[in-house]
C-alpha cells in the first residue's frame, strides 16, 4: 500500500467516529421525525400535519409568536453584547473592570433558578413592583407571562456568551490599525464601520446564528414565564406530545423548527464559503 493511500485511510479512520456519532444523534433522529411528521392518523403518508400547522389559527399564531420573540431577542442580544464588548475593548477604569467580573455570572446560574429569579423580580408582586410602589407607582407593567418576560430571559441567558465571543474577536483587532486610521484623520464612526465592524463581522455572524438557534428552540423560560397563548414552538410541541398525545403533529412541529434553523444556517455557511473563496482567489 502506498504512503498516500495509508494517509487517506488514516484520515478516514480519524473522521469516521465523529461522522458515525453525527449520524446516530442528528441525522437519524431528523429522518425519523420527518417520517413521523408525514404519517397521518390512518397510517398513510401525506402533508396533513404540515397543512394543520399553517391553517390552524392557534398553531399559526404560535409560529408567528416564536419568530417575533426569536428575532427581537437575537437583535437585542447582538446590539447589547456588541456594545459591551466594544466598551470593554477600548476603555479602561473601574466600570470596565466591574463589567468584566460580572457579565459572565449568568452562565453559571441554572436556567430554572434564573427563571424563577426573574419571576420574583419582575412579577406583579415581585421586588421591582414593590420598590416602585414605595415610590408612588400604583401599577406595574405586565412582564411575566408575556412576550416581554421571555425576551428578558433570553437576554439574560445569551448576552454573556455572545459578549465573550465578540470580545475575543475585538481583542484580535490590532491597535496599530486603529491608531493608523486616527493618524490619517478618521473619526470614531468611520473607524467602527470601515475597520472594526468588517474585521469582526464573521464572529458577529457566528454569534447571531447561535443565538437564533438557541432562542427558537428554547423551552425552560417560555414554559415558566411565557403566555399560555400564543406559545413558543418548544412549549407547544411539549403540549402536543404530552397532553394531546399527537406524535405526528409534534414531529411536524419539530421538523419545521429544524427547517427554520437550517435556513439560518444556510446563510451562515454560504457566507463562510464566499469568504473562503475570496481568500483563495
Image (cartoon, rainbow, N blue to C red):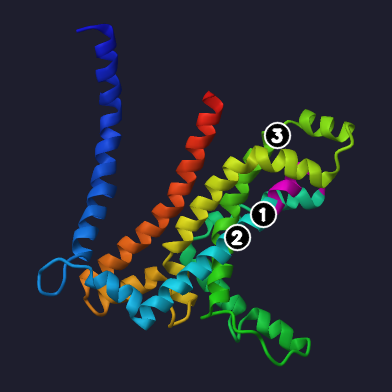
Q: In percent of the image, x 32 and y 73: which residue is there?
A: 53
| Foreground label between 2 and 1 | 2
Prevailing SS of the magenta stretch: helix
* Quadrant occupied by the N terminus: top left
Asked whether the viewer can see residue 91, the reply is no
Depth check: 104 or 213 in front? 213
At a point 89% along the width and 36% down the height, the residue shown is: 185
User: How far separated are the C-alphas under marks 2 and 1?
Assistant: 22 Å
Residue 79: x and y in percent read 66, 57
* Secondary structure at numbered mark 3: loop
Mark 2, secondary structure of its residue: helix
Q: Is residue 275 left or right of residue 236?
A: right
Secondary structure found at label 1: helix
Q: Find out whether residue 85 is within the magenta segment.
A: yes
- Work out whether mark 2 precedes mark 1 in sequence or the reverse, and give the earlier one: 2
- Picture quarter containing residue 21? top left
Q: Choose top left, top right, bottom left or bottom right for residue 216.
A: bottom left
Q: Residue furthest top?
A: 2
- Residue with the most extreme front position: 281
- Distance, label 3 to label 1, CA atoms, is 24 Å
- Residue 223 visible within the image: yes
Q: Is residue 69 magenta?
A: no
Q: Nearer the viewer, residue 72 or 142?
A: 72
Q: Is residue 262 left or right of residue 47?
A: right
Magenta part of the chain: 83-93
Label drawn at residue 173: 3
Above or below residue 119? Residue 125 is: below
| x and y percentages locating residue 131 in the rendered image | 72, 82
Residue at mark 2: 75
Q: Quadrant of the C terminus?
A: top right
**Do the residues under discs 3 and 1 have CB atoms within 8 angstroms?**
no
x 67%, y 84%: residue? 129
Amino acid at each position: 500500500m502506498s504512503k498516500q493511500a495509508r494517509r487517506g485511510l488514516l484520515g478516514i479512520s480519524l473522521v469516521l467516529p465523529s461522522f458515525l456519532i453525527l449520524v446516530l444523534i442528528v441525522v437519524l433522529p431528523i429522518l425519523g421525525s420527518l417520517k413521523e411528521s408525514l404519517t397521518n392518523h390512518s397510517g398513510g403518508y401525506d402533508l396533513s400535519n404540515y397543512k394543520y400547522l399553517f391553517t390552524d389559527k392557534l398553531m399559526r399564531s404560535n409560529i408567528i409568536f416564536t419568530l417575533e420573540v426569536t428575532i427581537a431577542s437575537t437583535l437585542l442580544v447582538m446590539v447589547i453584547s456588541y456594545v459591551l464588548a466594544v466598551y470593554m475593548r477600548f476603555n479602561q477604569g473601574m466600570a470596565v473592570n466591574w463589567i468584566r467580573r460580572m457579565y459572565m455570572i449568568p452562565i453559571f446560574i441554572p436556567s430554572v433558578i434564573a427563571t424563577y429569579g426573574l419571576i420574583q423580580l419582575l412579577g406583579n408582586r415581585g421586588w421591582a413592583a414593590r420598590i416602585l410602589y414605595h415610590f408612588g407607582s400604583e401599577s406595574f407593567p405586565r412582564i411575566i407571562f408575556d412576550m416581554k418576560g421571555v425576551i428578558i430571559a433570553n437576554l439574560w441567558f445569551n448576552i454573556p456568551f455572545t459578549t465573550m465571543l465578540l470580545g475575543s474577536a475585538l481583542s484580535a483587532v490590532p491597535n496599530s490599525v486603529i491608531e493608523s486610521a486616527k493618524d490619517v484623520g478618521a473619526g470614531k464612526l468611520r473607524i467602527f464601520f470601515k475597520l472594526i465592524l468588517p474585521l469582526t463581522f464573521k464572529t458577529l455572524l457566528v454569534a447571531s446564528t447561535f443565538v437564533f438557534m438557541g432562542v427558537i428552540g428554547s423551552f425552560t423560560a417560555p414554559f415558566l414565564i411565557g403566555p399560555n397563548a400564543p406559545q413558543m414552538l418548544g412549549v407547544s410541541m411539549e403540549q402536543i406530545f404530552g397532553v394531546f398525545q399527537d406524535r405526528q403533529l409534534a414531529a411536524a412541529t419539530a421538523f419545521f423548527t429544524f427547517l427554520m434553523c437550517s435556513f439560518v444556517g444556510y446563510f451562515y455557511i454560504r457566507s463562510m464559503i464566499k469568504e473562503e473563496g475570496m481568500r483563495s482567489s
